[in-house]
Structures are given as C-alpha cells and as structure tokens.
Image (spheres, rainbow, N blue to C red):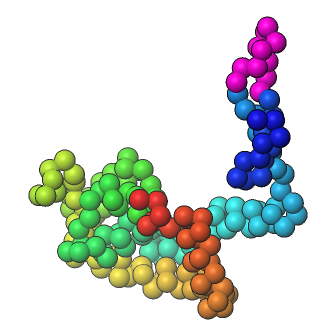
Amino acid sequence: MAGETSESGETAAQGPKDSNGYDDGKVVWEPRWLDTGEKEAWTALVSLVLLLPGRLESPLQQEAGLTLFEYLALSHISEAPDRRLRMSELAYLANGSLSRLSNVVKRFEQRGWVERSPDPADGRYTLAALTDAGFAVVQAAAPTHLRAVRELVLDPLTADEQRALAEIAAKLRARPVDLA
C-alpha cells in the first residue's frame, strides 16, 4: 500500500491511526501537484468554461431578450422530430435541472412559445412542443447566436484547432452524447 501509485500518478500513504495506534484501513493519496504547463492548461479550461457562456449570452440578451439557457432550450426543441422533446431530455441537453427548465418552460407557455402535454408513448413523461410562435423566436435569435459562436469560438481557430477542440471534448467526455 505505502508507495503504491494510482493511475493519476498520486502516491498512496498509510491512513491515520486510531486512538490505540492501529491503522484505520483508509488509504490517503498524496496529491500530484500541477506543473506549469498543466496549470496553464487547467486555468485556460476553467476560464473558458466560466467566461464563454456569459460572452455567448450577452448578444442574445441584448438582441433577442433570451438567456443562453432559454435559447438552447428553444433551439433543442426546434431541432427535435416534430419539434417535440421530453422535458427530462431537454433539461439534459440544455444542461439544466428539470426544476429550472420547468420554470423556463412555464414562461414559454405564458408567451405562447411552447405547449406541454403528457407523452403518449409513456404518460410518466411530459413533452415540450414548440409552437409556430416559439419557432419564430428561435429563427429570429439564431443568427445572433451563430454570429457569437463564430466570432468567439470558431473563427479564431483553424480547421485543425476546431478538430482538436472536438477531440479534446470527446476525450474529456464533455459532450452531451458522452454524458448520457
């Protein structure tokens, strides 16, 4: 046990002793601190994850009156077959809790953008269906979102860097398909 190394390179040490001096059986892993390159990569990723959503949301707020979460919810429904999607799947795709999504969809219903109904295939689920008015909102907001995605993410990168970004997301299992 002592001196054993984990897959991440951390080293195991004996756990704390109990009041009688006996090993409590726990393994304590000594951290493997980040080197300069690792810290730079980690800081860049955290900055990207924390700052990019706000930068993508700002133009949507200004031009369409939508948050990024609201736009993603509407967009995902618009891309689903028959513009209908289970609420649980939509919460997952929009990266929000079912509770948060329910509140947003309630506002969408009040605006006439979405209608909810029981899933005919399984009544335990609720479907969110995009109305024509809701589809018009997505169509009007999409160019604003696309412009921000291009300006902030895609255009600054070469085609090779875009592929590398997709490969990194796949390797880190950070794509919706990986989280299912």
List x then y, in percent, for residue 67: 48, 65
Residue that protrudes farthest toward the left in the picture? 120
- Quarter occupied by residue 161: bottom right
Which is nearer the eye, 8 or 34?
8
Residue at 82% x, 50% y is: 32
Q: Is residue 161 above or below residue 25?
A: below
Q: Main secondary structure of the magenta part?
A: loop
Residue that protrudes farthest toward the bottom in the picture? 159
Q: How many marks?
A: 0
Q: Quadrant of the N terminus?
A: top right
Residue at 70% x, 61% y is: 46
* Residue 119 visible, this angle: yes
Q: Is residue 43 left or right of residue 99?
A: right
Residue that protrudes farthest toward the top in the picture? 20
Which is nearer the eye, 123 or 164?
164
Q: Is residue 122 left or right of residue 157?
A: left
List x then y, in percent, for residue 97: 42, 50
List x then y, in percent, for residue 151: 61, 85
Q: Quadrant of the C terminus?
A: bottom left
Residue at 54% x, 76% y is: 59
Q: Is residue 77 above or below residue 20?
A: below
- Quarter occupied by residue 133: bottom left
Question: Is 113 included in the stretch rendered in magenta?
Answer: no
Question: Is 19 included in the stretch rendered in magenta?
Answer: yes
Residue at 83% x, 40% y is: 3
* Residue 55 visible, this angle: no
List x then y, in percent, for residue 22: 77, 14
Q: Is residue 90 above or below residue 62?
A: above
Which is nearer the eye, 10 or 157?
10
Q: Is residue 117 left or right of residue 35?
A: left
Which is nearer the eye, 3 or 87?
3
Residue bounds of the magenta highlight: 15-25
